[in-house]
């Protein structure tokens, strides 16, 4: 299971888009620039401040629209765990999630991420779903595994047991 890293005795900044939060994206920004898909992105679109805004926007969008206590139950999409956004390393889950978001953006007509615009709700959901799929594929998220007691098999037929295992 993924364990978020410790930051040399300090925790990741709690104030979104603060100067210390923005500078904490420097290493991630540098490593993302080495990916050929993102190398052509302009400095106005891919920089430390925009990465901080993207992560903050994803967190706010999830808080407002996803999960059990969401205002809108329209989409049956789960929230991505907030611990995934703590690791700002070049090979961590946040790098995977950001790369997923940029891959969606490159095939979309809009130029910038905007998680506040209700007209982009469907696009934002597709970003979250792509992040989730890529995080599962890279092993940062795991699907739950259920184990049944041996007594469950006694009350079921062979076809039902085969279907469950």
Image: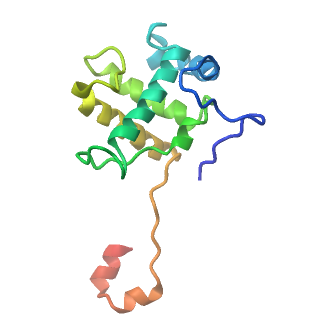
Q: Is residue 79 above or below residue 45?
A: below
Q: Is residue 39 above or below residue 154?
A: above
Q: Is residue 21 above or below residue 70?
A: above
Q: Between residue 55 and residue 144, name the one nearer to us.
A: 55
Quarter of the image for residue 112 reads top left
The percent coordinates of residue 116 (x first, y second) are: 33, 25
Outermost residue on the right side: it is 9
Q: Quadrant of the C terminus?
A: bottom left
The percent coordinates of residue 140 (x first, y second) are: 53, 45
Q: Between residue 51 and residue 14, name the one nearer to us.
A: 14
Direction from residue 87 to residue 53 in the image, left or right: left
How has the structure been colored for display? rainbow
Q: What residue is shown at x 45% (from left), y 7% (from top)? A: 42
The percent coordinates of residue 25 (x first, y second) are: 60, 22
Q: What residue is shown at x 22% (from left), y 46% (from top)? A: 74
Outermost residue on the top side: it is 43
Quarter of the image for residue 57 reads top left
Quarter of the image for residue 4 reads top right
The percent coordinates of residue 71 (x first, y second) are: 30, 44
Q: What residue is shown at x 28% (from left), y 50% (from top)? A: 76
Direction from residue 146 to residue 121 in the image, left or right: left
């Amino acid at each position: 299971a993924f364990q978020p890293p410790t930051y040399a005795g300090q925790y990741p900044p709690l104030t979104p888009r603060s100067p210390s939060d923005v500078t904490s994206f420097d290493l991630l920004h540098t490593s993302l620039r080495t990916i050929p898909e993102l190398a052509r992105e302009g400095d106005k679109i891919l920089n430390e401040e925009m990465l901080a805004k993207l992560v903050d926007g994803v967190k706010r969008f999830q808080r407002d629209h996803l999960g059990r206590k969401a205002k809108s139950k329209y989409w049956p999409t789960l929230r991505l765990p907030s611990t995934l956004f703590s690791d700002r390393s070049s090979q961590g889950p946040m790098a995977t999630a950001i790369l997923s978001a940029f891959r969606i953006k490159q095939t979309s007509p809009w130029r910038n991420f905007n998680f506040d615009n209700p007209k982009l709700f469907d696009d934002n959901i597709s970003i979250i779903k792509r992040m989730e799929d890529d995080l599962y594929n890279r092993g940062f998220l795991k699907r739950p595994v259920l184990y049944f007691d041996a007594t469950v098999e006694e009350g079921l037929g062979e076809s039902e047991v085969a279907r469950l295992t």
